[in-house]
Amino acid sequence: MSKYESEKTQSHDRGRFSEGRHFAPVRLPFRRRLQTLAVLWHSCSIAATLSFFFFLCAVPPMWPLIIAYLVWIVFDDAPETGKLRTRKWMKNLKIWRWYAGYFPLHLHKTVSLEHKKTYIFGYHPHGILSFGAFGNFSTEATGWSEKFPGIDVSLLTLSSNFRTPLYRDYLQSMSLASVSKRSCEHLLDRSQSICIVVGGAQESLLAQPFTADLVLKKRLGFVKLAIKSGASLVPVFSFGENDLFEQVKNNPDTALYRFQQTFKKLMGFTMPLFHARGVFNYDFGLMPYRRPINTVVGRPIHVEKNENPTEEEVKKIQATYVRELERLWEENRDKFAPKRKREMRIVA
């Protein structure tokens, strides 16, 4: 039994109130409080930065600066043109070590990567909020630069995130960029490695604890990018990413699923209905469970640069990528997914 599970069990009698809620004991190591705070900040960062922005809007002396800033956002194309505004000190903040310690989050290297090459890292699975992708590729919490020296990576996210005041600047300081085709091409042209959460919003709807259902069959865009740029493909599998939340059942024949699909078509992203634990209780809330995430970086798949690849060539490289991803799963599943309900599946 893990330390967390032990604490939870011991707290049942001390912390049980009405409706069977199991509250966290008052006497917990301060380190664990800091870990919770770090993950809470990440989970609420978009709401926090927006709230601060609206607070500034309520201060009249700030209006000229706010107007100038909003005009700058309209014309600033950095997120779409591969212009990074990384602040290394941001990626090295102590808060990210607390963040990694919450789950905990670990990064596992299987082979060395040549620092002179450019890579496209494919991250699987998406999970609900891709906590592992952020912790490994946007911070130094798990020691990326020590394990893979000389390889700078930009984690890619939705373009809409860069239209949110202040939040966009926060993301850029952590080396994040837009996942748009234009942005990817510009970054790769500058020999900047990128990380794409391949399954996207559709895969987030499949995230259930102790399963690994992937959306990959028709995902050919990242393979085409690799061939056109000459970048090597590297599959990455995060064991435990799907275990962090419970998701309301949304089978394809349900009204919820139809609503989520319609929402995705209109907005470009979707809204899984999920829950896990709270800040002060173990039973319900929007905080992720304290369950380990083990991110395993696979072997690179080198491709010949071809600006006009055929469909057959793209599918051949994709098949090689899938085989390497399956190898990652098979070699590590017993160690990092002992409680799995079934094997990894590529369902769409």
Image (cartoon, rainbow, N blue to C red):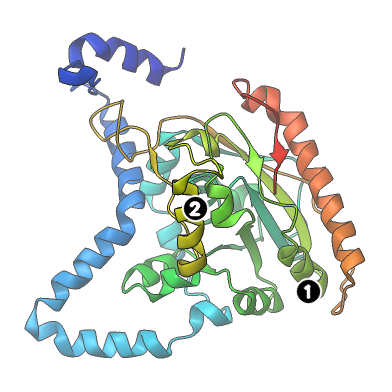
Number of residue marks: 2
> For mark 1, what is the residue?
229
Kind of residue at badge 1: Ser
Q: Is residue 9 left or right of residue 82?
A: left
- Residue found 60% across the figure and 76% down from its top: 183
User: What secondary structure is found at the residue carrying circle 1?
Assistant: helix
Q: Earlier in the sequence, mark 2 or mark 1?
A: 1
Quarter occupied by residue 335: top right
Identified at 66% across, 55% down, the residue is 149
Residue placed under numbered mark 2 in the picture:
258
Res 61 label = none
Residue 348 sits above or below residue 150 on the image: above
**On screen, residue 287 above or below 65:** above
Front in this rendered view, residue 248 or 281: 248
- Decide: few, some or many residues near mark 1? Use Cα within 10 Å; few <14, some 14-19, many ≥20: many
Residue 71 percent coordinates (x, y): 32, 90
Q: Amino acid at mark 2?
A: Arg
Residue 179, percent from left and from top: 57, 69
Left or right: where 82 falls relative to 333? left
Left or right: residue 311 compared with residue 241: right
Judging depth in this view, the residue of 213 and 327 nearest the camera is 213
The residue at the point 39 percent across, 71 percent down is: 168
